[in-house]
Image (cartoon, rainbow, N blue to C red):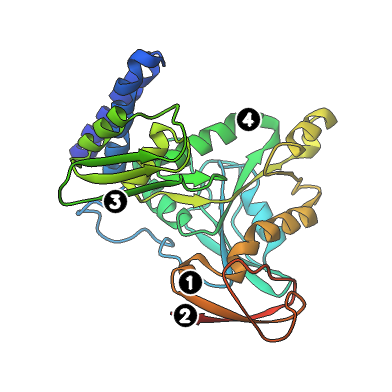
Amino acid sequence: MSSLTMGILEKIAEIEREISRTQKNKATEYHLGLLKAKLAKYRAQLLEPSKSSGAKGEGFDVMKSGDARVALIGFPSVGKSTFLSLMTSTESEAASYEFTTLTCIPGVIEYKGANIQLLDLPGIIEGAAQGKGRGRQVIAVARTADVVIMMLDATKGDVQRELLVKELESVGIRLNCPKPNIYFKPKKGGGLSYNSTVPLTHCSEKLVQLILHEYKIFNAEVLFREDSTPDEFIDVIVGNRVYMPCLYVYNKVDQISIEEVDRLAHRANSVVISCGMKLNLDFLLEQLWEYLGSFTSIHRTLASQFKYALVWGTSTKYSPQRVGLTHIMEHEDVIQIVKK
């Protein structure tokens, strides 16, 4: 690890310690906002590819194929390799120790006429976000996915989920939340133009100005359309955040009490399964299909070039019908997209 990376890591650790020490109240909100802006800035530096990093890691420049891409992440030994071999025709070498999957192995799930690329990413362990091992490359691949399946060991409670969510957030991946509704545009002059269409309880003009100054931005237009937090505002400034749906999949439910199974199953965006006993895998596929619905009909890379579409099928009054982006497709409809 380079001395530059070490220096950045030390700064990150220092800021994190200060944030945890600082009580959250009216008197400290500017101080905390500034610390969070500094933290986001250093984390972004950490993710920038280093000039001396030479060749890419084996198995990481994964060709995107099929109709959608799903990133399968989780700690080692949670059953990802077994899951992959049950769901696809790929054999991922399984063993019960850390980092058994050394390269990124793509498998394909064929479901309802679609090919879903499932990527078994090497076990992201706490610290991968700090550039340890292959962490940076794993994250780069995860960011290109349409949906994340977070594989969790049901016998471990909520610890793994909390750690992985925190880990992904620190590298700019936001799970199951919409993009903040804030209009932000840096300008060449004129100072700060600050407005909001709703009452704000987390941010103020002074705080927004302080955060912008941390990024050396002195002229900008900012419009809050919702009551966003300083963290969400920082996300908008940084601009490289990825917002994606995530399914929390709890494996090994055959090893916990029925009450605990019930508790996990009722959590939002969660599915309980047992790869060992092949339980509930069909329901998981159905849920995954629902999550992918918006992506498989019109992929996000097409959305910016979308002009209109022609649809044949049961969702239209006549075939073909010219439709816009908001049209809801039905199963087995055929779509032809016309780009700008």
Res 307 visible: yes
**Dot 2 crowding, Cα within 10 Å, few <14, some 14–19, many 20+:** few
Position of residue 9 measured from the top left corner of the image (x, y, whole percent): 28, 33
Which badge, 4 or 3, comes first in the chain's sequence?
4
The residue positioned 45% from the left and 36% from the top of the image is 228
Q: Which residue is mark 1?
A: 302
Callout 4 secondary element: loop
Q: Which residue is mark 4?
A: 158
The residue positioned 24% from the left and 39% from the top of the image is 5
Distance from Cα at disc 1 to Cα at disc 4? 37 Å
Q: Which mark is residue 270?
A: none
Callout 1 secondary element: helix
**Tag 1–tag 2 contact (CB < 8 Å):** yes
Question: Is 174 displayed left or right of 273 in the figure?
Answer: left
Q: Residue furthest bottom?
A: 320
Amino acid residing under circle 4: Asp
Amino acid residing under circle 1: Leu
